[in-house]
Amino acid sequence: MIRNFFKVALRNITRQKAFSAINIFGFAIGLAVCMIISFYVYDDLSYDRFHERSNDIYRLLTKDTSVEDLMYGITSGPLVAGMKEGVPEVLAATRVSNNGRDNIRRADIEQEEDAEQIHTFTLIADTDFFDVFDFKILAGNSETPLKDPNGIYLTPEKAEHVFGDDDPIGKPVDFMEIDGAYVAGIVEQPPTNSSVFYECIVPFRLDWNPIWWDSWRNVALTGYVLLSPDADLPSVKQKIIDYAADNGFAAIWQPQLQKLVNVHLDSGNLRFDTMNFGKGDRSKVISTGIIALFVLFIASINFINLSSARAAKRAKEVGMRKIIGSGRKDLILQFLGESLLITYFAMIIALAIFEISIPHLNEFMHQQTSIDLIRNPHIFLAILGAVTLVGLLAGFYPALIISGFKTLSVLKGSFHTSKSGKILRRILVVGQFTISISLISAVFIVKSQIDYLNNIDIGYNRENVVDLPFQNGEHLQAYQEKVRQLPGIESIGMINSLPGGTLQKFQVFPEGEKTEDGAMFDKIQIDSGLIPTLKMELVYGENFNVDMGEANIDNVIINETALRYAGWEGDPTGKTIRIQRENDTQETKTVIGVVKDFNFTTTRRMINPMFLDYSEENFAFLVRINEHQSDTFLAAVEDIYHEFYPEANFRATYLDDVYNFQFRQDQAFASFIAGFSIIAIIISCLGLLGLSSYMTEQRTKEIGIRKVLGSSVMQIVKLLSVDFTRWVVLANFIAWPLTWYAMNLWLNEFVYRMNINVGIFLISGLAVIVIALLTIGVQTVRAANANPVKSLMYE
């Protein structure tokens, strides 16, 4: 019997080629898209869960109580170091610092002076690092890791890069100016879903940075703690807060705990989040997960819709089967078997698309995620379960309805599809297009918001400003002077941070401050040329004096937000602020000006109180050029640069590009939604094409009669199209308020946000209506042009 079911199922699939192709490929594309999106969602949700005790590991954060909702991803070194003694529930605590990229060379063999320097990403960690985390030491000293200040640990890949096939254990290296540095061990490479990343781990040494790392009043390190499994989290939090307060932690700071498994996705608003590699965004992960379900839902609706619609064509077959003895159970099994066979065909195609697409998507998204379905059977079983459920739903409904009709009425041709079936199909089509319209509208809104941010007044002018490379030292002044002589130069300025970067924060006490805690101010270091270069507006006072040089260090310029915080009325020039420095001393400076508020971090945050300090040694060398000179300017600067620094690489960046870099994730997200919106519309239109084909076929005789009675082609096309148009228009009215609500939630993340324009909904709705009409137009025009004689002879 099973063999017969299978044979009949294959025969029906091949007999209705167009219907089968639409069903199989429509569902396969939807399933493949869902699998691809789910793959990346799964990867994001799995971050840091490979640690056996991942649910008991927490990262220490610092809450700045002087500014609402401001959190730092760093903490105080002594707080972490004393945690085991101060809080009984803490089993281990480790101090970690991201040292960025360093150069490493083997020192056991003679090398040329100009031999290639190998770059390695370095982590500085104390002895509790391997007690908190499950990273395995594969070779070397695993008994007392990180105890010897000269013993470093390399990953296998980096060790091979440095030493080739030689055994690296015990071998000396030239690294970070550590006298007697050697390879103490090989540590496993962190997986791609780890927020803690390294290629080399170096023992923690306080003497490298005692002012920042050994002060209760400074937060400069990342701290992790391992709690006992039965620890009461609220109680532990309070003990940590009390322990910090009792030992001199700044009163405006409050320690907080963040679960390690939440670090990857829940750190979007953290500042100084230096230990979070591959940082994600939970709201985007949830959104993409919902999109995956939407696409699968659309594909499933198509499949169920078309299957139930086409089932009516087989009414006479059902009647004949009943006459020769088939029971209702047999008929239901036959329909279910055919439906499952089609879905399993689609699943095989979807798996093929998935396997082919992932490497290309990884390359496009700069990721290295991979998944082995054989080693992760639960994932394959989830896919199989979803496919089976869709197949059962698609086969069960028509099988149950048709198998229940009387044999005589079916064979006489008096069988008609039920009204409830038509209503269900219309509801499903409306649901499909509601989702498609919502996705298209969301794409327009995201892109409009990014355009809005690119054009708002952020307090400075970034157009035609170039960030040029330079090196502090004896050649800097001569290099600057030579650049200044180039034609087209309007002004030159120095600054210690570029837009979108993390700013330093200092505890500041304005003159007349009534509280003991003061407030945390952002700090930017500039020279006298920066304000005119960025065309910032001075509200009060004056800029740093170019002729005073280093004498400017006794003065500061503040922003309007700082002026409001201080409560000073009118022009504040001449007033003073006290700045808490790293070594627990205070420095008094005189305010010489107030600059109009400008946003230099991210448009998702409010502008904080800020002071601009004077310095001639900075990170960025900014030049404003005449827009007509941009083509020749960079080539000329490169020549000058290599005169002074012949071995260095020249890399210049326009400030506009630096500013726009902060929106790269939002732009990628918009492109992501746009791509899958197009796929969702294609799948919806495939279903609409199949459904319109079926409904046109059902009304073949009616079309023939209308043509005989004088109806024109346009009248018939209008008659056949009006029903579908109604459904798509209804979908618009459902999609618009839902999208408006959802996108407003996203826009509320921005300090500067656009108001949603009604035109966005009208354009997206009209686009979908046009696409839908073009899709069904192929079928309706063909039906309207058919020979009425053949139409009347139909059936």
Image (spheres, rainbow, N blue to C red):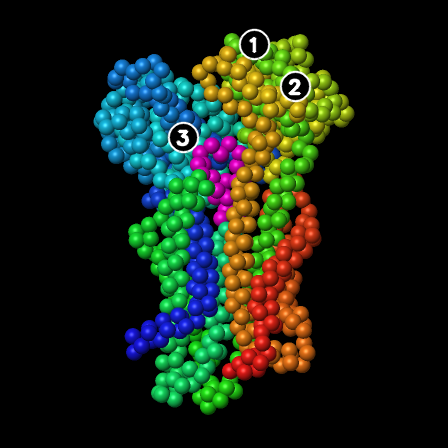
Dot 2 corresponds to which residue? Answer: 488
Dot 3 corresponds to which residue? Answer: 96
Magenta-colored stretch includes residue 67: no
**Kind of element beneath mark 2:** loop
**Residue 782 left/right relative to 760:** left
Q: Residue at x 69, y 50 (%)?
A: 757
Which badge, 1 or 2, is on the more N-terminal residue?
1
Dot 1 corresponds to which residue? Answer: 478
What amino acid type is highlighted by mark number 1? Ala
What amino acid type is highlighted by mark number 3? Val
**Kind of element beneath mark 3:** strand
Question: Marks 1 and 3, Cα distance to the nearest angstrom?
Answer: 40 Å
**Closest to the observer, 500 or 731:** 731
What quarter of the picture does the N terminus occupy?
Answer: bottom left
* Residue 506 in the image, given as x and y percentages of width and height: 57, 25
On the question of residue 589 being in view, the answer is no
Tell me the tag on residue 157: none
Span shown in magenta: 265-285
Q: Quadrant of residue 479?
A: top right
Q: Quadrant of residue 175?
A: top left
Q: Residue at x 53, y 58 (%)?
A: 682
On the question of residue 140 being in view, the answer is yes
Question: Marks 3 and 2, Cα distance to the nearest angstrom?
Answer: 47 Å
**Kind of element beneath mark 1:** helix
